[in-house]
Image: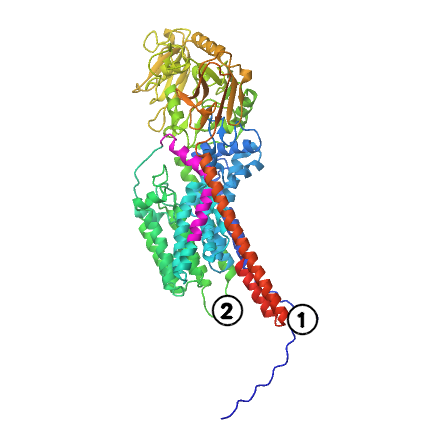
């Protein structure tokens, strides 16, 4: 048996301790950028392309700030711009009220729900950096910035899921942010854009859960997303859960690890929602107490319309805006035929994209997407989730290389079939087909040029530039086309101009708060003129308009739009006295002043009507508002006409005709337009001017409305009634009004009911107990010996929400402390191993390298 020959001994290798410094190898710099820098570059590219495309589309449409056309259509001008103006005032210390109560709108209403619905985005405070008269420009800048941020977040997510070309991640991130839903629907609902940002961020928390990292950061991300806009964050959370489910299915891990990752993701989101509870709980309770909006049954869109919305240059609010750029759509369509992608991956991402699309057309799934209530207006508000899923599917295709010619050809054929199916839809346009066909040809050529093949110099930069130009051009055209549709079919409101400046200056000069209110009156420039222009008026438009306020104001003669959610101010001397309105802005810019009641008054104890105490408990009647006004005032101030349609000379004529949609006038007076169109609009109680007797007969310029009543106000009676109530009221000098409180010193021997000129919304308490209601206003009983009345407002649900947030914060702190202790223990263990190894003389570079890699995994 032969013995093996020993191999020649290798020369001894100097250790790190003995090797001279000059013999150490010089560090080499990688010619390629680091993954983090590549991800950052992709995000920057996505943001720049998105911002350029949006601004180009707006400029092409010649809308504000690039042209003469108004951009503030529908709720953008009616709600969102005025609310951001109020936020500007809050941040600059000029608002009436604070975070809990808004004294400027609706004669005093809860503000925290509005804050959580419209203004809690991290981007919203940026409006404070602009001059107030540029509030429209500030909201536009925030809108563009949000859209760009969504693109950057999606590009970062894609590079986190799988490595790929940074510019491709940027391109796909931009195509997500420039989807049809974003540039057409969310562009004038800025708070919806927070959901566009939330979807990739919540998907990113799922990636962290898969890797067992950054749990605390995931909780904070979820909290920010749900606080920014809970409505779209709910949809984004559902979409992110579906994406995480696919990721778990595709992960080749033991079931225990997959369940653990899912539990970490769910725990992070639930804790994040709990952290946002101080805003969410009051918001949900306020929604339940709001005046009921418009409800309708969901009807799926025709499939021809669905396919048509994949084309650029289409517009509709009754079908899902599926456009994401033909370059992205081609990758999604080619995915099932991309042989380099594993079959399980193709089935998973292709199946998820199809399943999400199909769920839009199934009523139970539709309700699940929308918190189990069909929304007013657009029924496809979750479309951004489908856009995000499609972009992730496109990235899954690119992660295994650009699809080959066969896959691209098959994908092109699939998209051509979809375009053919869209030809039967009235939404499809010649420009849309031209943009789609041309973009498909150019995108196909660009992806073909980037196809895998023999090693050769391929035109990567020109092809990438071509894909960017196709996307930006199609998105800009879709943006401009959307403006055309919105301006043609929706109400629009002027941007801040000379009329706004003049009215705001007049209101500021007449200001006397809290001694009296100043009302911007009608006709209004927006549904929230008190927030936009100043003053403390009765107009208020919100998703949280309280039911008690709408019904009280309607009973007193107010008009409305938006089916009762947009309550208008009442131009009436009686209601001005009741709500402490001492200055009212007229349409010509002048201010009419009066001597109203103070904010806090005393009424006789017990039930009663205009004649005094006794009788059944008072309640408003369903009919003309004149008796209801007298009931709240406690005196008779109106009289019936002396003849049909004729008021006595010396009185003032008022017409109530809530369904009337035409002009009305006295025979010797000017005409007034009344906007009754039930159930959407309700015409307000209209002052017609002083009557001169028979020569001032009522003239209607349209057929007699189904309900109408003419009544005549006697100013002398009104002045006497107001003087009597002022005599029994607290001294106006003793009334103190805080951000969410009112207090006053009562005259000696006072008793009865103290009434605050504010709607009796839930949350008021007076003298340490819940406030009551007096004909829709805040009230509290006053017993003999009571010297002061102190009322404070706290939104219902604030304390339970704060308790939930405190509990969640405690859980997060405990988990983070455990993680830090575990990390410290691991470091200490590694230090002991290294010390023992050094004492035994066998420590080397490999030990330090292994220890460093362990620390990286732990952190």
Stretch in magenta: 263-292
- Residue ranking furthest to the bottom: 1
Look at the image and say whether residue 274 sits in the magenta stretch.
yes
- Count of all numbered marks drawn on residues in the image: 2
Instruction: Tell me the crowding category of disc 2: few under 14, some 14 to 19, or many 20 or more residues within 10 angstroms, Cα based.
Output: few
Horizontal and vertical percent position of residue 234: 41, 44
Q: CA distance from mark 2 to mark 1?
A: 46 Å
Residue, disc 1: 17
Examine the rendering and report whether any part of residue 177 can be seen.
yes
Residue sitting nearer the eye, 197 or 144: 197
Vertical relation: 413 (above or below) 181: below
Residue sitting nearer the eye, 527 or 857: 857
User: Dividing the image into 4 quarters, which one contains the C terminus?
Assistant: bottom right
Residue, disc 2: 456
Q: Which mark is residue 510?
A: none
Residue sitting nearer the eye, 106 or 430: 106
Instruction: Determine whether, in the image, residue 337 is placed left or right of residue 525.
Output: left
Horizontal and vertical percent position of residue 805: 48, 41
Magenta-colored segment: predominant secondary structure: helix
Task: Name the colouring of the figure.
Answer: rainbow
Vertical relation: 797 (above or below) 767: below
- At mark 2, the secondary structure is loop
Horizontal and vertical percent position of residue 466: 48, 56
């Amino acid at each position: 048996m032969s013995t093996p020959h020993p191999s020649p001994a290798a020369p001894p290798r100097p250790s790190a301790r003995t090797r001279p410094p000059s013999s150490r190898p010089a560090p080499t710099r990688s010619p390629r950028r680091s993954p983090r820098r590549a991800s950052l570059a992709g995000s920057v590219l996505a943001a720049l392309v998105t911002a350029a495309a949006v601004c180009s589309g707006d400029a092409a449409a010649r809308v504000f700030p690039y042209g003469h056309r108004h951009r503030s259509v529908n709720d953008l001008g009616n709600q969102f711009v005025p609310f951001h103006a109020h936020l500007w005032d809050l941040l600059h210390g000029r608002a009436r009220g604070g975070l809990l109560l808004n004294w400027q709108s609706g004669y005093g209403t809860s503000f925290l729900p509005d804050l959580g619905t419209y203004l809690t985005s991290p981007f919203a405070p940026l409006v404070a950096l602009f001059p107030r008269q540029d509030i429209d420009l500030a909201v536009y800048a925030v809108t563009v910035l949000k859209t760009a941020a969504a693109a950057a977040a999606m590009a970062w997510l894609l590079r986190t899921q799988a490595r790929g070309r940074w510019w491709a991640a940027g391109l796909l991130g931009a195509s997500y942010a420039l989807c049809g839903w974003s540039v057409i629907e969310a562009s004038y609902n800025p708070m919806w854009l927070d959901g566009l940002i939330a979807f990739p961020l919540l998907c990113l928390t799922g990636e962290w859960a898969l890797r067992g990292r950054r749990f605390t950061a995931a909780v904070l991300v979820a909290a920010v997303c749900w606080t920014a806009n809970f409505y779209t964050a709910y949809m984004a959370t559902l979409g992110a859960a579906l994406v995480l489910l696919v990721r778990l299915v595709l992960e080749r891990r033991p079931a225990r690890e997959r369940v653990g990752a899912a539990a970490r993701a769910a725990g992070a989101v639930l804790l994040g929602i709990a952290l946002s509870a101080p805003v969410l709980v009051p918001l949900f309770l306020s929604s339940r107490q709001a005046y009921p909006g418009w409800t309708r049954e969901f009807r799926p869109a025709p499939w021809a319309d669905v396919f048509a919305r994949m084309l650029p240059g289409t517009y509709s609010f009754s079908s899902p805006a599926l456009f994401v750029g033909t370059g992205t759509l081609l990758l999604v369509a080619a995915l099932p035929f991309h042989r380099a992608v594993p079959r399980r991956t193709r089935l998973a991402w292709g199946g998820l994209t199809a399943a999400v699309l199909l769920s839009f057309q199934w009523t139970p799934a539709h309700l699940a997407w929308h918190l189990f209530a069909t929304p007013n207006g657009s029924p496809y508000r979750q479309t951004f989730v489908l856009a995000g899923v499609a972009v992730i599917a496109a990235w899954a295709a690119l992660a295994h290389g650009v699809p080959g010619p066969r896959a691209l050809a098959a994908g092109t054929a699939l998209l051509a079939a979809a375009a053919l199916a869209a030809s039967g839809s009235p939404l499809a346009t010649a420009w849309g087909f031209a943009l789609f066909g041309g973009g498909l040809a150019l995108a196909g050529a660009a992806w073909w040029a980037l196809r895998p093949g023999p090693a050769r110099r391929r035109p990567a930069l020109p092809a990438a530039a071509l894909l960017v130009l196709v996307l930006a051009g199609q998105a800009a055209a879709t943006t401009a086309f959307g403006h055309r549709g919105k301006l043609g079919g929706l109400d629009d409101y002027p941007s801040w101009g000379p009329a706004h400046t003049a009215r705001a200056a007049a209101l500021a000069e007449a200001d006397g708060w809290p001694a009296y209110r100043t009302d911007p009156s009608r006709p209004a420039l927006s549904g929230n003129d008190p927030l936009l222009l100043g003053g403390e008026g009765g107009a208020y438009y919100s998703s949280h308009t309280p039911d008690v306020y709408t019904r009280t104001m309607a009973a007193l003669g107010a008009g409305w739009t938006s089916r009762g959610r947009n309550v208008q101010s009442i131009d009436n001397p009686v209601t001005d006295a009741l709500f402490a309105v001492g200055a009212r802005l007229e349409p010509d810019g002048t201010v009419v002043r009066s001597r109203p009641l103070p904010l806090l008054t005393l009424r006789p104890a017990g039930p009663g009507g205009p004649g005094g105490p006794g009788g059944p408990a008072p309640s408003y009647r369903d009919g003309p508002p004149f008796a209801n006004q007298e009931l709240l005032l406690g005196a008779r101030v109106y009289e019936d006409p002396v003849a049909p349609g004729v008021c006595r000379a010396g009185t003032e004529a008022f017409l109530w005709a809530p369904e009337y949609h035409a002009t009305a006038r006295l025979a010797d007076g000017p005409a007034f337009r009344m906007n009754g169109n039930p159930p959407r609009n309700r015409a307000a109680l209209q002052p017609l001017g002083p009557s001169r007797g028979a020569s001032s007969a009522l003239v209607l310029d349209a057929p007699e409305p189904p309900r109408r009543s003419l009544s005549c106000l006697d100013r002398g009676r009104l002045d006497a009634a107001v003087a009597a109530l002022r005599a029994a009221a607290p001294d106006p000098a003793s009334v103190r009004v805080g951000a969410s409180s009112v207090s006053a010193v009562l005259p000696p021997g006072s008793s009865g009911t103290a009434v605050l000129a504010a709607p009796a919304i839930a949350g008021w308490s007076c003298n340490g107990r819940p406030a009551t209601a007096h004909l829709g206003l805040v009230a509290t009983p006053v017993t003999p010996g009571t010297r002061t009345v102190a009322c404070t407002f706290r939104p219902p649900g604030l304390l339970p929400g704060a308790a939930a947030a405190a509990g969640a914060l405690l859980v997060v702190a405990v988990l983070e402390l455990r993680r830090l202790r575990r990390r410290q223990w691991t470091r200490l263990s590694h230090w002991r191993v290294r010390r023992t190894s050094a004492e035994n003389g066998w420590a080397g570079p490999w030990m330090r390298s292994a220890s460093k890699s362990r620390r990286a995994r732990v952190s």
